[in-house]
């Protein structure tokens, strides 16, 4: 599936052949003038620089025909809508593009979606009738990535990593054209044909997958029109083993607002037919029967706190005890909870001795153990509020009222049914307001699902992020390590117990 051609113009409606030729001549003269000015910018520089190559002259005319480099470089996004004809079936489609190289093409074939997209790193798509999108790999992914960049309205042939070879002149359907061979960084090559009269792209030969593996395909570009100072093809004819597939563009927007998420492959998908009992049943199954047998977990990783990413170790014990030890560049920090009292040591905040945390913080720190043991979904009265997204995943939102009267919004993954997010009012690290805890990157530790990332935000600002790299179930942990040490006795020399 091609994105709309970004380049060029033939004749405009209402203009005669003589006017067209004069405008083409003016464009050529303007390009040559720009090159001449560059060559004489400094006498010494001009003497050491070679004459512009045939490729340089072709590209200069081509850029000017499209609207000029200044205009091309001002484009951040584009969107086009139109109709595609495939084997006698007319299908509406939308093409969305966003700098630097993101593209999404979406068509509607009798109520079935066809999607092909590239997010800048991953190519993916969904064929009509497929239940969900799939990621593309290998040659198919490389071909789609190369086409996404070349088809963008801002593409310059000097893009980093692209190689362009001038391959002479050739007679094509629309007349004489300059032939360029454009090779993407991944090795995918396109043949691009630029009209010698107007400097606009007339045809492109590339690789595409139409469901039978990669094959040569040809796209012809016609009916160029001015859109906000750019000359854009409003008709494309794609020729492949399926025959000719004309695409007619009906609208074209330059720099519209586009949601960046549409270029990325959707994550988990929820089932709207499930009720609360069904969601909770799958949640318990996701936790696994062996999870209930795990009593302790030790883990190691890093924590991002106060602008630093530093080493940490974590210890958990049922039912709700945990301890986090952080090495803040030589200063030891502790955040712990024994099921009743939350306490900390934080020299950077002036807390030198173990000190209890305010009561309103207990709920925020206790949530860490709830996440690990899966106790959030069974911590009070729950109701299923519907399906909402957490990042790119659909999740089931459960509204929970705890035994203490605290209201929480809990989000379970649409496919894995594991905790992904919890939102409630509270306090954390000397900040109060809406606490938003997100969790991701689960790993298996002795049958228990251990989160790899836990991010805690207060009023939208991230306060801390825990990144767990490895975890061990059933570790030997001293229960006393979770309890806050007694304060030092002023009458007894030496450190506190």
Image (tube, helix red, strand yellow):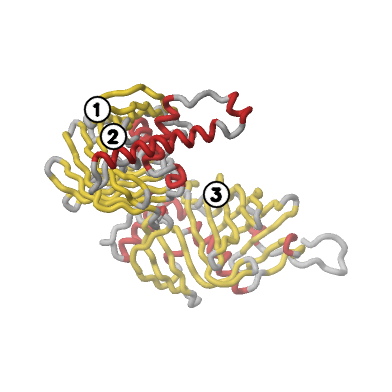
Q: Horizontal and vertical percent for residue 59?
A: 41, 33
Secondary structure at badge 3 equals loop
**Viewed as shown, does residue 248 lie left or right of 458?**
left
Cα–Cα span, label 2 and label 1: 9 Å
Image point (26%, 35%), residue name: 219
Q: Can residue 268 be seen in this view?
A: no
- Quadrant of the drawing holding the N terminus: top left
Q: Mark 3 points at which residue?
A: 474
Image point (48%, 49%), residue name: 441
Q: Name the residue under label 2.
A: 202
- Mark 2 in CB contact with mark 1 (< 8 angstroms): yes
- Taking depth in this image into account, of 227 and 180 the one nearest to the observer is 227
Q: How crowded is mark 2: few (under 14 residues within 10 Å), some or many (20 or more)?
A: many
Eye-nearest disc, 3 or 2: 2
**Chain-order first, disc 3 or disc 2:** 2
Q: How crowded is mark 3: few (under 14 residues within 10 Å), some or many (20 or more)?
A: some
- Taking depth in this image into account, of 7 and 11 the one nearest to the observer is 11
Secondary structure at badge 2 equals strand
Q: Horizontal and vertical percent for residue 91?
A: 19, 49
**Chain-order first, disc 3 or disc 1:** 1
Q: Can residue 98 be seen in this view?
A: yes
Indicate whether 304 appears above or below 409.
above
- Mark 3 in CB contact with mark 2 (< 8 angstroms): no
**Chain-order first, disc 2 or disc 1:** 1
Question: Farthest top residue?
Answer: 168
Q: Horizontal and vertical percent for residue 384?
A: 35, 68
Q: Mark 1 points at which residue?
A: 172
Eye-nearest disc, 3 or 1: 1
């Amino acid at each position: 599936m091609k994105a709309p051609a970004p380049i060029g113009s033939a004749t405009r409606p209402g203009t005669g052949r003589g006017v067209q030729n004069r405008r083409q001549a003016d464009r050529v003269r303007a390009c040559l003038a720009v090159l001449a000015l560059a060559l004489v910018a400094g006498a010494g520089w001009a003497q050491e620089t070679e004459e512009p190559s045939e490729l340089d002259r072709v590209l200069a005319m081509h850029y000017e025909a499209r609207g000029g480099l200044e205009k091309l470089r001002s484009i951040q996004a584009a969107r086009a809508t139109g109709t595609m004809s495939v084997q006698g079936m007319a299908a509406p489609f939308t093409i969305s593009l966003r700098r630097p190289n993101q593209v999404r093409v979406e068509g509607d074939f009798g109520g079935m979606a066809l999607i092909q997209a590239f997010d800048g790193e991953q190519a993916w798509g969904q064929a009509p009738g497929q239940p969900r999108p799939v990621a593309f790999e290998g040659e198919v992914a490389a071909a789609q990535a190369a086409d996404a960049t070349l088809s963008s309205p801002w593409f310059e042939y000097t893009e980093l990593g692209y190689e362009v070879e001038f391959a002479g002149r050739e007679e094509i359907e629309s007349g004489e054209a300059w032939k360029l061979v454009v090779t993407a960084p991944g090795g995918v090559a396109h043949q691009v044909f630029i009209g010698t009269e107007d400097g606009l792209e007339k045809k492109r030969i590339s690789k595409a997958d139409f469901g039978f593996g990669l094959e040569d395909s040809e796209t012809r570009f016609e009916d160029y029109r001015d859109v906000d100072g750019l000359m854009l093809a409003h008709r494309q004819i794609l020729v492949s083993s399926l025959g000719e597939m004309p695409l007619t563009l009906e609208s074209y927007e330059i720099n519209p607002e586009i949601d960046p998420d549409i270029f990325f492959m959707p994550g988990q998908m929820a089932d709207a037919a499930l009720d609360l009992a069904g969601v909770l049943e799958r949640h318990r199954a996701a936790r696994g029967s062996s999870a209930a047998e795990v009593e302790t977990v030790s883990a190691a990783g890093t924590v991002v706190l106060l602008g630093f990413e530093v080493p940490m170790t974590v210890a958990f014990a049922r039912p709700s005890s945990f301890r986090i030890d952080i090495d803040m560049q030589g200063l030891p920090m502790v955040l712990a909870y024994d099921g009743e009292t939350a306490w900390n040591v934080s020299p950077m905040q002036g807390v030198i001795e173990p000190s209890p945390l305010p009561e309103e913080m207990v709920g925020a720190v206790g949530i860490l153990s709830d996440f690990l043991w899966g106790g959030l979904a069974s911590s009070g009265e729950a109701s299923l509020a519907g399906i909402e997204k957490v990042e790119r995943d659909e999740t089931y939102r459960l509204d929970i009222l705890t035994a203490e009267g605290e209201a929480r919004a809990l989000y379970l993954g649409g496919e894995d049914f594991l905790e992904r997010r919890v939102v409630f009012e509270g306090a954390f690290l000397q900040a109060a307001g809406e606490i938003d805890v997100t969790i991701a990157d689960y790993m298996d530790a002795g049958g228990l699902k251990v989160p790899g990332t836990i991010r805690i935000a207060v009023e939208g600002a991230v306060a801390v992020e825990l990144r767990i790299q490895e975890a061990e179930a059933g570790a030997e942990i001293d229960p006393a390590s979770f309890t806050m040490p007694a304060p030092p006795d002023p009458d007894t020399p030496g450190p506190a117990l």
